[in-house]
Image (cartoon, rainbow, N blue to C red):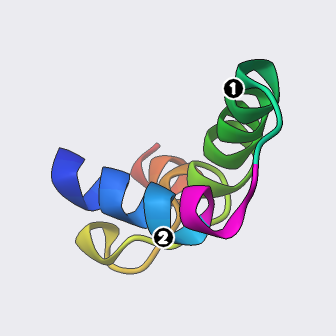
Amino acid sequence: MVETFFKTLKSELVWRTVFQTRSEAKDALGRYIDGFYNPVRRHSTLDYFSPVQFERLAE
């Protein structure tokens, strides 16, 4: 599962972006993970719900 995450991260963000500084890359990675990957992006292993939606349904 971790390998899938890193492949997705690289294909959706890293390979499409030219970072000028390490700090810029770090900020972009944080925004991607906290702003898109966790709350919005649907995951096949969660029945195509986002993690946030899946957690709400489990409550």
Dot 2 surroundings within 10 Å: few (below 14), some, or many (20 or more)? few
Which residue lies under the disc numbered 1?
26
Is residue 32 in sight in this rendering?
A: yes
Q: Which residues are magenta?
A: 13-18
Q: Which residue is depicted at the point 70% across and 22% down? A: 22
Give the label on residue 41, or none.
none
Percent position of residue 20, x then y: 83, 37
Q: Which residue is depicted at the point 48% across and 70% down? A: 11
The amino acid sitting under disc 1 is: Lys
Q: Relative to 20, say whether 10 is above or below.
A: below
Drawn side of residue 1 relative to residue 27, left or right: left
Give the residue at the far top of this rendering: 23
Asked if residue 7 is among those painted magenta in the image, a careful observer would answer no
Q: Earlier in the sequence, mark 2 or mark 1?
A: 2
Percent position of residue 25, x then y: 71, 34
Q: Quadrant of residue 31?
A: top right
The amino acid sitting under disc 2 is: Ser
Cα–Cα gap, marks 2 and 1: 16 Å
Q: Which residue is depicted at the point 40% across and 50% down? A: 58
Give the label on residue 11, or none.
2
Drawn side of residue 44 relative to residue 2, left or right: right
Percent position of residue 10, x then y: 46, 59
Give the residue at the far front of this rendering: 20
Q: Nearer the viewer, residue 9 or 43?
A: 9
Could you tell me which secondary element the residue under label 1 belongs to?
helix
Q: Quadrant of residue 23?
A: top right
Is residue 1 in sight in this rendering?
A: no
Percent position of residue 53, x then y: 57, 60
Q: Which residue is depicted at the point 34% across and 51% down? A: 6
Asked if residue 15 is among those painted magenta in the image, a careful observer would answer yes
Q: Quadrant of residue 44?
A: bottom left
Q: How many marks?
A: 2
